[in-house]
Image: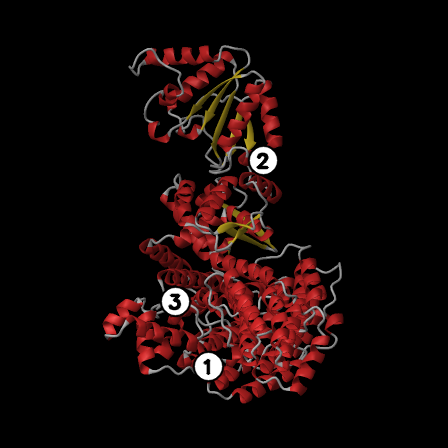
Amino acid sequence: MRKRGRAMVIGREQSLAAALDLVHAGVSVDVVGGRGSGRSAFLRALRARLEEGEWKVIQVRGVASLRQHPLAALHLAGIPPTGTQRSTSGLHETAEALRHALRLPRSVLFLDDWDDLDESSWGVAEAVRRSSGIPIVLSRLQGLRARHTPTGLAASTLEPSYVIDMSPLRFEEMEKALEHYLKGPIEAATMSRIFAKSGGNIGLALSLVDACIREQRIALRGGKEWVATRDLWSSGLRAVLEAHLEDLDDAARDTIEIIAIVGVADIETVRKLIDWGTLELLEERRMITFISSGARQLVTVVPPLIVEFFRHEPLTARRTRLTALIVERLGTAGSASAILAERENRQPTFGTQEALFVRLLQERARARRIVTASEWEANPSASSAVRYLRALMHTHTPTVTETVRHVFDTTDASNGDVAGRADFESLRAEWTAYVDHDLDGAQRRLSEASITLGPYARMLDAVDVRLQANLTRIPDDFGARLEVTDDLPDDVKLQLWETQMLVLVSTGRFSDALRVHTATETVERPRDAYMIRVLHGLALLGIGSHRAALETLQQGFDEAHGYLDIDALRAFGAAVILVQLLAGDYAAVDEIVETVFAAGEPSPLPPGVQLSLLTIASVVAIRRGQLSLGEKIAQEINGSSILDGPLPGQTHAWPRAQLLAFDGKVQAAADDMWASSQSLWDRGARFAAVLGMLSSLELAPVGERLAVARRALDELPDARLLQAHGDYVSALAEGDPVTMLACVEELEQVGLVGLALSACQIARTTALERGDDATRRAADSAAHAIRAAHGDRAFDTARFGAAAVTLTEREREVGRFAAMGLSNQEIATRLVLSVRTVESHMHRIMRKLDVSNRKALAQHVEVLS
């Protein structure tokens, strides 16, 4: 069992020294903080220091359930009366016993959880303090109204005391405390998530860490470093967070939950929902905080874990009541009322967890639309319009599109601070280019708006470069247009750096992209700057750091899931799916695909994320033999107006080529993908272009095209992922099994596991044809080592070469029963066959479908039906 005491006083050394000096001087001390702030641990550490100095410490602790029993706390602490009667003589005798226990000159009385003391125990302690002059050290909750007794009784006098505030820890202090507690370092991103969720409250942080380790949401990687592997929320935290809320009356608890529902909101909006008295009380209790944002005062709940607690509470009636209250008080705005009429009537068809997640997303999105609509209609400034527009764009329907156009048309873009105006013009240009398909018009708007924006005009430069990269070609002068200088505001720098990373990743300059990412860490990055982290993951993928890329992107996905940040969830999800698709790990893709698509239709901005999600979903469905689903998604892609984007996966060619290959038209598939890749190369999208070229060559390794691809690779020296892929394609063209096997180790290291297994299979087949038994054994050994290293995970080895699989009627019948989980004996009994015959059918089914275990048969429902 880990010890919390030492961890909970790290960062309190200065306060501890001050308390020690005060007690030595005979001054009483109040240790004040919220729940989980470490008050009791602080008292334990102070007691240990005093006892080392030969002080006599008597400690009494309040117990809430015994508050109605006179002298209960003192009696439990071993300060005994002579009888059991609760009378005046009992008070006198208890006081004398306490005075006797504190008779030595170096004596002190500790009262832990003073708020829970019974009045009689406090009265005796006060009487002894006044008569003997001994100091009292007590711990009490932060923010309770000024009073002189635990239950609020008035007193005519007040003994002086010094207050020591158990304020939230700073990041470095909490990191040191948790690393001491866990006896090991914590990965940087994981530590940031813990700190953000706990709000610096060490007790909450320790409870969070304990719960997540128990549920394997945080794990020790390589025996060296603690890393978050999933979303950092546990139902086991409910009791801890309930304790934070237990002293609140109904109005205060409703207030906390209302703010949690609406998210960070303007004080003027919150005031329409909540009275000042309750807000003041919650601020005193440190359960809400006010954040300055330009001329606005924003209100949010602290610590953020309380917000997650309310989001995961399964109290539908309560949530409905509070949402109705928000509607009643803010829903008078016309646009808000229109949005509320769009209640989702679609019933989720996914699992319980996904259904809960979708419900939470819908509730949060709905609340944000109401709040931002109210703020915009009260003050239609550029900043309030941006917040409202972003809330609207989470739901892309004809009604919402009409509302978006109305907001753009009726907002005075000159109303507001310069940063807000730059945001508004950026968003309007993106909408004009991506949704209205008017790139020229968008660029004119950017040019006209930049005249009045001063240094924020550079933000519009970044938007213009992004528009060109996504819709036409990467501009040759992007370096000069995206230059970052020290005099620029941090939010402008981040926009420029993000666009630099987009261009550098797209052009295959991964090391340069990583250098820019390091620069972004020199300023504070808001949570909505998630694309920087997505591009960081893709840059890591490009240089061949598959594991680091996957961890970076998966952590971002989990964090977005926890914060209900739908845009970040989709962006990280698309990137994680791409990484796993390249690895051929479909089992890992399933959960993320289900979560992302359960969240509903993607926002139209930016278009690349939406296209990437649809493209990859179509390809995966077709490769699994789910032809009708794959065709349906491919038709949706073809029917959309989204153009190919500059990043891998953002192309119409992938599902088209997969469908052609599935129908046996391999050369046509290769030609289609090659033509698309050539177009991407001409646009400057070299990462996506070369990846497409190499995939085309896997299908049809044509000599002339191989030479073109090799020349392209020569221009991307740090693209280790693509270099490994290119070496394999060259070996495939040569048809030499030994050369193919030489590529296997590098393919696995850069994360192309399915391709590595494919190399083993092709090398084995070629070696068998040539009678080369040594090479065949080497291929078998290499494949066995790869599969052993990755457990029972099934990897796709067919890739774009996946073709339609033909099973006999009996094989489909056996396969359906096996996919349902029946054993060979049970299948034999049902079909009146011998077990040996069933085994033979199973062997042929698994060979034809290229699966390694029975569990994977469930992925081929359409082939078996």
Q: Secondary structure at mark 1?
A: helix
Percent x, y of residue 408: 55, 73
Q: Secondary structure at mark 3?
A: helix
Task: Judge by depth and name the residue closer to the eye, 662 or 605.
Answer: 662
Quarter holding the C terminus? bottom left
Percent x, y of residue 756: 56, 70
Percent x, y of residue 609: 54, 72
- Label 3 amino acid? Lys
- The image quadrant of residue 847 is bottom left
Task: Judge by depth and name the residue closer to the eye, 332 or 692.
Answer: 692
Mark 3–mark 1 Cα distance, whole angstroms, equals: 30 Å
Direction from residue 744 to residue 144 in the image, left or right: left
Q: Characterize the local packing of mark 2: few (<14), some (14-19) or many (20 or more) Cα atoms within 10 angstroms.
A: many
Asked if residue 465 is positioned above or below residue 305 in the image, the reply reads below
Q: Earlier in the sequence, mark 3 or mark 1?
A: 1
Tag 3 residue: 855
Observer-side mark, 3 or 1, equals: 3
Mark 2–mark 3 Cα distance, whole angstroms, equals: 49 Å
Tag 2 residue: 10
Q: Earlier in the sequence, mark 2 or mark 3?
A: 2
Tag 1 residue: 636
- The image quadrant of residue 262 is bottom left
- Label 1 amino acid? Glu
Identify the residue at image location x=33%, y=78%: 812
Q: Is residue 463 visible?
A: no
Mark 2–mark 1 Cα distance, whole angstroms, equals: 56 Å
Return the mark for residue 499. Answer: none
